Image (spheres, rainbow, N blue to C red):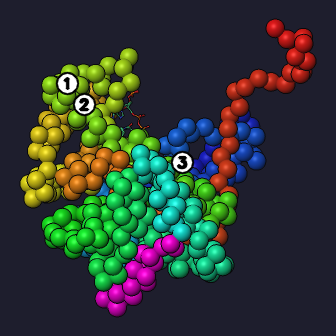
Amino acid sequence: MSNATFSHDEVRLELPLAEATQGNNGYDITRLLATTGDTTLDVGFANTASCRSAITFIDGDAGILRYRGYPIEQLAETSTFLEVSYLVLNGELPTPAQLDEFSKGIAKYHLIDERMREMFRSMPRKSHPMPVLSAGLNALSTFAESKYGAGAYDPDRATHLLLGAMPTLAAYGYKNSVGQPFLYADESLSYIENFLRMSFGLPTGPYPFDDAFTRALDVLLILHADHEQNCSTSTVRMVGSSGANIYVSVAAGVNALSGPLHGGANQAVLEMLKGIREEGGDVTSYVNKVKDKKDTTKLMGFGHRIYKNYDPRAAIIKKHADEILRNLNGNDELLDLAVQLEDAALSDPYFQERKLYPNVDFYTGLIYQAMGFPQNMFTVLFALGRLPGWLAHWREQANDPATKIGRPRQVYVGEVERDYVPIQQRG
Ligand code: ACO
């Protein structure tokens, strides 16, 4: 592989090649503006690498996803969410002693400040739990600083603190929405068990754990742990690049994730399936509506910026969905509709030509619903899973000497200079 040369009129500029260990290399255009006076235009950053990163590798054409080199299929089969979090953050799988220390370091931060509980209690019952979660994370920044001073920003402490507090914040958002009492964490439980108990348990009695349920959530969180430079992770990096602290950067990631084109799609898929059922279950007419260019309806849970093949996470979830839904007495009717919708789309030239396949969100909502989570909690579960990735990217960026504040250029298409007209002389 070699450098490329940009040439236009009299100008020639060598573009050094930034070599990848695998996948797309990048041509370094850093000197383009200074040399030519012109910039590049890449709406939605579909062609632009914003950094060098060693965390996650995706080959979208081959449907490959690896965290730190390990295939997602192997991790989903045999690992746990905390082990994967350690891997994503540290680059290597932990020894038993390292995992034990990591887990205990996180568990001690499940207990949040009592006044934060009051804050959650004062949120409107009908609030969507995503902005509630991001409000909680912003508040966590202030509580952490008032308790630990500058020590709140020690990267290891902040990582443990955020991983520890996140399930509590997520569960409290849910408890507030259903008007139930907040539970304190139980540090003797696993990360997932503790979250489930804090979400669905009551102070009136013990919470009945179900191993299949716990493992299903563990696997779902593993599948969400990182996904390189997606919209929310790029947001975390962008906010962090200004020097903003890790807590508020992660809060910004939650906000980015909430959109229906990103993590909010898992909620939108279930709404779509229910809508199709209410209309009589006609999958073909829904697919026709999606294909109609005069209609803005999209097939939610389909399509991906990077995957032009089956999203490997969707493949794993689909494999498990049937079994999980049967175990959890989930809604087979909606699963049937989802399978019919997928079959109809995959055999349709519109979707084939555009290489649109189910993404991670297509089947997750059905499982979350079967677990007992309300629709508006689905994206919170995504955020819980994505947290290690956000933290790893924030830290990777902070340690990268090449980091600069994120500040894109624009191609200005507005008015050229004109003189101010006093209001009396207008119209
Ligand atoms: N339904 C119908 N048509 C679609 C869909 C869809 N879900 N997704 C893409 N297309 C069409 C577009 O209309 C476009 O058609 P055109 O070439 O005739 O104009 C073509 O496929 C290319 O799509 P783009 O929008 O250019 O692709 P982009 O990479 O910008 O968008 C995205 C990717 C946002 C995921 C898109 O596929 C989408 O909106 N999907 C539905 C929402 C969703 O499921 N989001 C979750 C993504 S995964 C995640 O964030 C965790």
Q: Which residue is mark 3?
A: 48
Prevailing secondary structure class for the magenta stretch in the rendered image: helix
**Distance of label 1 from label 3 (alpha carbons):** 42 Å
**Residue under the point 57% across and 61% down:** 138
From the top left corner, tell me how far across and down residue 24 is, in percent. 44, 54
Please state if 214 lies on the left or on the right of 424 as rendered: left
Q: Secondary structure at mark 3?
A: loop
**Residue under the point 38% across and 24% down:** 296
Please state if 330 lies on the left or on the right of 308 as rendered: left
Q: Residues within 10 Å of mark 2 (few under 14, many from 20)?
A: few
Q: Which residue is mark 2?
A: 275
Front position in the image: 39 or 373: 373
Does the stretch in magenta take in 117?
Answer: no
Task: State which mark lies toward you, 1 or 3.
Answer: 1
Decide if residue 298 is in sight here.
yes
Q: Amino acid at mark 3?
A: Thr
For ligand 1, which image quadrant applies? top left
CB-based contact (under 8 Å), mark 2 and mark 1: yes
Tag on residue 279? 1
